[in-house]
Image (tube, rainbow, N blue to C red):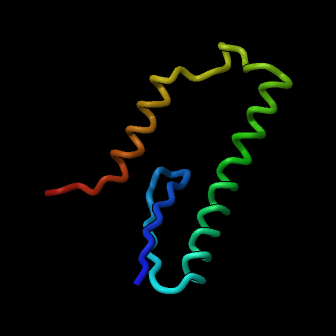
Amino acid sequence: MLRVVVCLIREDDQCRVEQVGGTGRELASALLAVLVFALAWAVPIGEEREDIAANGLSPVEGCTPWEELREAHLARLAAQRPVVA
């Protein structure tokens, strides 16, 4: 029996694992789902790149330093982690 494991990374950095086994039709359905997900993820990135090419980068004064973004993301991850007694 053919088994395929697909890991989809969503915007919230969570990985959803799907296991598909059996027929070629199930495999085709799983691969189509991955392609749809990848396209949905790639289109906004392409649009952002087109905007940068047309308008240039945002001024530095309006940007958030990467250190602040990192700390905010780590705080979100820590809040999601269950507390162990």
Q: Within the image, what quadrant is residue 19 found in?
A: bottom left
The front one of 18 and 78 is 18
The count of marks equals 0
Q: Quadrant of the C terminus?
A: bottom left
**80 to 33, vertically: above or below:** above
Identify the residue at horizontal 69%, vertical 55% (top origin): 39
What x and y, as percent, mark residue 21?
45, 82
**75 to 28, vertically: above or below:** above
What x and y, as percent, mark residue 80?
37, 53
Q: Quadrant of the N terminus?
A: bottom left
**41 to 70, vertically: above or below:** below
Furthest toward the right, the residue is 54
Identify the residue at horizontal 59%, vertical 63% (top origin): 34
Identify the residue at horizontal 49%, vertical 30% (top origin): 69
Q: Is residue 13 left or right of residue 46?
A: left
The front one of 22 and 51 is 22
What x and y, as percent, mark residue 76?
42, 44
Identify the residue at horizontal 42%, vertical 76% (top origin): 3
Q: Within the image, what quadrant is residue 2 found in?
A: bottom left
Furthest toward the left, the residue is 85
**78 to 2, vertically: above or below:** above
